[in-house]
Amino acid sequence: MPPTRKRKLDQTTSISNATSPPKRHQVEDLTREEAELPATPQTLTSDKGMDSDDDFNSVASSMDLGEEMSSSVDFGAADSDGDVDEYEDDNTGFETSAKDLVGKRKAFETDFRVYSPQDIQNQQDAQVAEVANLLEQPPEATAILLRYGRWNKERVIEQYMDNQEELLEKAGLGQDIRRNPPRIESVSGFVCDICCEDDHDMESFAMICGHRFCTDCYRQYLTQKIKDEGEAARIKCPGDRCNKIIDAKSLDLLVPADLTNRYHALLMRTYVDDRESLKWCPAPNCVYAVECSVKRRDLLKIVPTVHCDCKHAFCFGCTLADHQPCPCALVKKWLKKCEDDSETANWISANTKECPKCHSTIEKNGGCNHMTCRKCKNEFCWMCMGLWSEHGTSWYNCSRFEEKSGHDARDAQARSRQSLERYLHYYNRYANHEQSAKLDKDIFHKTEKKMTLLQATSGMSWIEVQFLEGASQALQQCRETLKWTYAFAYYLGRNNQTEIFEDNQRDLEMAVENLSEMFEKPTDQLAGLKVEMLDKTAYCQKRKVVVLDDTARKLKEGEWDLIFCTP
Amino acid sequence: MTAPLPKRIIKETERLQNEPVPGISATPHDDNARYFDVMVEGPGGSCYEGGVFNLELFLPDDYPMCPPRIRFLTRIYHPNIDRLGRICLDVLKNNWSPALQIRTILLSIQALLGAPNPEDPLNEAVAKQWKENQQEAINTAREWTKMYAQRK
Ligand SMILES: [Zn+2]
Ligand SMILES: [Zn+2]
Ligand SMILES: [Zn+2]
Ligand SMILES: [Zn+2]
Ligand SMILES: [Zn+2]
Ligand SMILES: [Zn+2]
């Protein structure tokens, strides 16, 4: 393995893992080919998970310091070895392209990692085990400490070393949880303060604080917290103003298994929510979480698209569907603007009026104020809405308005119209690609039928007709990208980079339309067009990479004049 | 047919009758043992001194897992009580514990009369006045107490 192979990743580094090869995701076109190869098992045993986290934390904390976000971060040699091993395990034909890909890492690609619920659980358990070992606290108590400290391991350990009692108290733990393992007891003379029952053999439970309640009341209380309130990480003792937090072991004693499962699912949810570097995949019913080290403050300079194992591509920054090359803040603005029809409505009110006689809508074009209603032939003055015949000799100007105000009004109208026309220019193209992408999706479903048909008529194998699916998917992805280039362009101020962007955008658009046309061809011709279609698909992908790479690189380097504050 | 009254509510009611808290009373309705007429006296030394405030209190089905519902019927000028008589009090919301009782809640309400907290307001207008001109706010509270909260 060549020692020179260092990746410049800027702020997009992810966990490096010293011992197990991380399931590195190379994005874009190759992902699909990769997916057809034998899957690499996700190796994340508990101790390895911790190593990975150590590395991650150190990277993250060094990134927290200062604003030098563009400093490159090297992956350890072991990590790179891992990568190579991973590919070498696969078929040899692919090996070269995998290596090439690593060398040609693009500016728009972000490092990330996908985790299954089991991985997340293991990760949590590993951290708990490690800290528990260090602090000599039972795992249940350690989990409470870590949740209290929002999983900032270093800080929790530091605070514990600083002032053990204070931290335990603040986190809702007692001192001697180890010496008193939780247990259900029958205490003579006990009266439950919640239900007021006092049967002498009634089972009851108390945490370290000594607030004792019967197990029925405890169970009811915990059920309400977990089921109705969705609480798990910080369920307090039912005692008045008691801050002791119920631990997993005590909970297991008190509630039925279905509730324990829900409890642990909720804990996992808070674990992911508590960590800036982890996010749930937003796809419906998807159970995976994605780890990515891009921070919120990086989002003006980077659009971190990640690809979940469920095939959903989304932005790690805002969790919307992939919106490269447009930065999150602009996407938000753009969507709001599109939603907000008021802009169009304003223009209509500024540029159209009702005929004072028949009330049909009249649009003003040109500067002349002498209006003639097309419907009723009424002649009137645009400025004052009065009858034109009453304007006497003042020709095309309304004498009832001061010259200057009339002039200003005309100017304002022209400006409002111009800005709307600009918006509509980009909006129409944006909406067109959005619409076309939907149509392309329909085409994809038709394509599946075509593929089956093609197999039957041409004698091609399933593998041989895959090019149709590939083309269809490329088409949809490129349309998505194109769509967002128009939102991007709307907020783009002109400078010497704009022309290159527009050229790239146009090239991609042409490539997409050319490929799109091929789907119109009758099925019996498709077999003969395979080579051409493969070429056009590859060309589309290439143009897309050019657009994304150019925009991402210049975004990172601040070379675009993006207008973040116009409406 | 209604469910039998839980032991907890029976005990609490008995205790409220047999060992009443000074300056506070809570009497259940004959036809609904979960519905109480409540009377709280303004604490001595406060701007509500001499006032007798009527409240209504209802114990929902999930009491004591959920807090009682309670509101002032008598008009009162207080930054943590709104025009509908609703009360902003932590133990009636997030800090409710099933170990709390009607008696402790009523004591907390009485304490709230003695220590208005304009920093956590429910009634913005009153809270603003309380912060900007406390003396005037106190005077208004006294006037309202005379006007609306006299023993009949
Ligand atoms: Zn009980
Ligand atoms: Zn307690
Ligand atoms: Zn997913
Ligand atoms: Zn985003
Ligand atoms: Zn007309
Ligand atoms: Zn006129």
Image (spheres, rainbow, N blue to C red):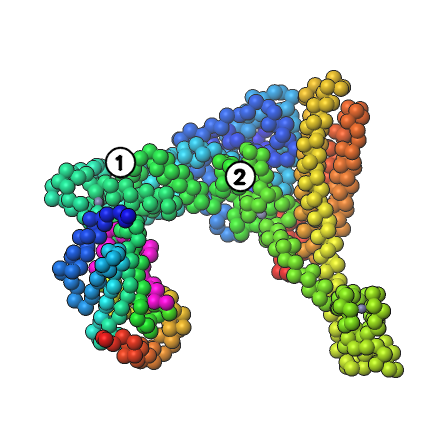
Q: How many marks?
A: 2
Tell whether position B149 is magenta: no
CA neighbours of label 2 inside 10 A, class few (<14), some (14 to 19), many (20+): few
Work out whether B75 lies above or below A157: below
Quarter residue A127 falls in: top left
Which residue is found at the position 69% from the left and 36% from the top? A442
What kind of element bears circle 2? loop
Q: Is residue A213 visible?
A: yes
Mark sitting on residue A284: 2
- Give, as a three-letter code, the residue at label 2: Pro
Mark 1 touching mark 2, by CB under 8 A? no
Quarter residue A401 falls in: bottom right
Q: Position of residue A139 (x, y in %)?
A: 31, 37
Which residue is found at the position 38% from the left and 76% from the top? B129
Q: Position of residue A530 (x, y in %)?
A: 77, 26
Q: Chain of mark 2?
A: A
Work out whether B12 lies above or below A553: below
Q: Position of residue A506 (x, y in %)?
A: 77, 45
Residue A294 in the figure: left or right of residue A220: right
Tell whether position B103 is magenta: yes
Range shown magenta:
B84-104
Which residue is found at the position 61% from the left and 25% from the top? A36
- Give, as a three-letter code, the residue at label 1: Leu
Question: Looking at this view, is A50 or B129 the one in front?
Answer: B129
Image quadrant of ligand 1?
A: top left
What kind of element bears circle 1? helix
Question: Is label 1 within 8 A of ligand 1 (CB to nearest ligand atom)?
Answer: no
Q: Quadrant of the C terminus of chain A?
A: bottom right
Question: Looking at this view, is A187 or A323 the one in front?
Answer: A187
Residue A158 in the figure: left or right of residue A22: left
Q: Which residue is mark 1?
A: A253
Q: Chain of mark 1?
A: A
